[in-house]
Amino acid sequence: MELTLEIMFYVGVAVFVHILVILFVMGKQKSKSICGRHVVVTGGSKGIGLCLAVECAMKGADVTVIARDEKMLSGAVALMEVIRQRPEQKFQFRSLDIGGDYEQVERVLGEIEESVGPIYALINCAGMAICGVFEEVSVADARKLMNVNFFGSYNCTRYVLPKMKKAGEGIIVITSSQAAMFGIFGYGPYAASKYALRAMAETIAMESREFGVSVTLALPCDTNTPGFEEEEKSKPRETKIISGGGGLVEPEAMAKAILKDALKGNFISTVGAESWLITMLGGALMPWDGFFTNLLHASVIGPLRLFSYGLHKYFNSVISKCAKEDRQQKALKEEGSN
Ligand SMILES: *[C@@H]1O[C@H](CO)[C@@H](O)[C@H](O)[C@H]1NC(C)=O
């Protein structure tokens, strides 16, 4: 039964991805240009953020990277120097400690604007992951997750958005996660912080369109970054089995897709068939491309509801199996100590 579902799913996905590709090639959207414009990337010293900074530099933008670690930040600037496109292109970094206050963010972004110019695009990439079964994640870590992931993006966006609306142009990227599409074992407060970002992105996208500001919600799956390595350490084995099936995407590919969607003004940015499917099912009320894409979504969402049923059945069987193993292990240990 599971195999049939899986085959059905892959055939279906293959057919529709092809149709989507045809539609996209036919309906070429205009892209905005960031050449000579000021782009700020938070979390720009490593991972997807660094790749995005490099992509922007390659497109001729003036780039400011913000993160905590000065050494890594100067490395990011050095990397951009290597691929400089125009002699007058400006690259700089600012070290900003998270967990400060809004005034600090306001001051740093203000200084950046003074030295390079008004911010045309804000790419929020700073984030962290701590996994674990709900009661295993400390209260302090839960607060930290919410502050870094949600308030980090909130504070920067809060400063920049009113100015962009006034200027009548601008791009905001908010990096959430596939974990904002449905709750998964072991993601507790992390998923909550990513859901919060998703909600914020949906709201400000609706509020800002009229003012010429586009908002893009990036929904990456597992990506091969230093942050992911860190995350793996705290992941319960159930989580590894459940979310490990999707494989790893390289950060360069993710960054390219995010920037492309941001420049086209697309609200959703995902990579791969699996993320596409989960986003479609988990976010069926989100604005996503034009009428024909939505018509396609409408025709597959119904049958694919069965796929989500199968998925949950599978997840529950993994969780039961792990719990059974734990009980056996415990029993063995007790026997040994007697
Ligand atoms: C955002 O601003 C609030 C309010 O000043 C502050 O409590 C929080 O620590 C700030 N968070 C970040 C990540 O800048």
Image (cartoon, rainbow, N blue to C red):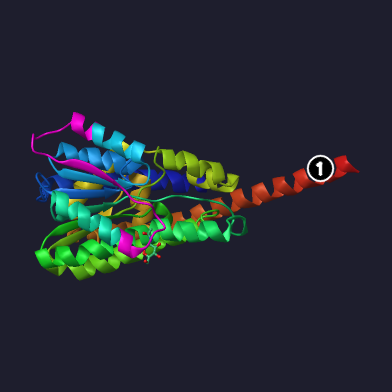
Numbered range of the magenta stretch: 79-104
Q: Residue 11: x percent and y percent?
A: 35, 44
- In this rendering, the answer to whether 310 lies above or below 89 is below
For residue 276, side relative to residue 305 (left or right): left
Of residue 126 and residue 333, the one placed in the foreground of this image is 126
Of residue 315 and residue 251, the one placed in the foreground of this image is 251
Quadrant position of the C terminus in the picture: top right
Tell me the SS state at disc 1.
Answer: helix
Q: Residue at x 54, y 44 (%)?
A: 240
Q: Residue 212: x percent and y percent?
A: 12, 63
Residue 114 picture quarter: bottom left
For residue 48, side relative to residue 38 (left or right): right
Cβ(mark 1) to ligand 1 < 8 Å?
Answer: no
> What's under tag 1, amino acid-wise?
Lys
- For the question of whether residue 172 can be seen, the reply is no
Magenta span contains residue 88: yes
Magenta span contains residue 92: yes
Q: Residue at x 35, y 36 (%)?
A: 71
Residue 151 picture quarter: bottom left
